[in-house]
Amino acid sequence: MTSNDQHTIDEYLLNRLDATERQSFEQSLANDETLRKELEEHQQLIAAMGLIGDVQMKERVKRIHQAELGRGAKQPNQANLWKWVVAVIILSVASLGIWLMVRPKAQTPPQLYASYYKPYDLNFGSRNTDASQILAEAGNLYKAGKFAEALPLFEQTLSIAPSDSKARLAMGICQLELKQYDQALTQFSALIEAKDPLFGEQALWYSAMTKLQQGSTTEAKTLLVKMLTDYQTGVFYKDATQLLSDLSN
């Protein structure tokens, strides 16, 4: 078979022949068994290329084949060339199918939240001031997971000492635990905007967690990028890097 015949087969299968050319080719098919067989093989090739969504794959495989010849591979005869090409394409499709079956499935935002979230471990000392005593009591409840009971005590602490960033962070986490998302974001945002030196990074992380819980993955990613930019040696850097990767899958 000549290269012109191969080109005509390709053009026929891709519906690129005009009416006269198509009629002439179909007459040749009716009288030439070898041509019909080559047409069938080319149809397999086009079908395989369609499965992987790239009608240029044949040219890619031909380039691979030429490279193999350059490394000393034996030149196949013309009748076997397209069999070899089809086999390569079908193998590629099979490999793609296997990969699609075994690749890890992307996790949903709630699943990612469950994987990454836990309340921040805060230490609450006891000093001889009203605010500190209330904060210590709130801290004991916080550590015990009694967030609903701790919340009003953190609010009371902030009414006495509005600049207490530890109480504000803890209050936001309590509100997040209690699904009071907007209120939680208000507390975290105050720390972020103030560029709090103690808990600015934590505020960004828990803001991202809140957005994740709300299903706002784009906003969560924006917060994570900011956190990774501003706090390159932070305590959440590794988790934030991995979470950002998970969200991008």
Image (spheres, helix red, strand yellow):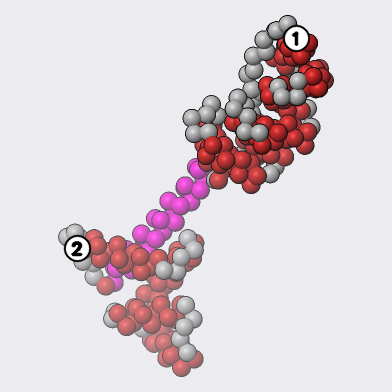
Residue 12 x %, y %:
44, 81
User: Which residue is at a point 81% across and 22% down the rendered structure image?
Assistant: 159
Residue located beneath label 1 in the image: 129
Mark 2, secondary structure of its residue: helix
Between 67 and 12, the one nearer to me in the picture: 67
Residue 73: image quadrant is bottom left
User: Which residue is at a point 37% across and 64% down the rendered structure image?
Assistant: 86
Q: Is residue 235 placed above or below 214 in the rendered structure?
A: above
Residue 110 x %, y %:
67, 36
User: Which residue is at a point 41% across and 87% down the rendered structure image?
Assistant: 25
Q: Kindly report the distance in space between the C-alpha atoms of the residues bearing marks 1 and 2.
A: 84 Å
Query: Is label 1 or label 2 in front?
Result: 1
Residue 152 x %, y %:
82, 20
Determine the main secondary structure of the stretch shown in magenta: helix
Between 165 and 153, the one nearer to me in the picture: 165
Who comes first in sequence, dot 1 or dot 2? 2
> Label 2 amino acid?
Gly
Instruction: State which quarter of the image contains the N terminus.
Output: bottom left
Q: Is residue 26 placed above or below 84 in the rendered structure?
A: below
Q: Does the image show residue 154?
A: no
Q: Does the image show residue 42?
A: yes
> Label 1 amino acid?
Thr
Please give left or right for residue 37 compared with residue 247 in the image: left
Instruction: State which quarter of the image contains the C terminus.
Output: top right
Residue located beneath label 2 in the image: 70
Magenta span: 79-104
Residue 90 is inside the magenta segment: yes
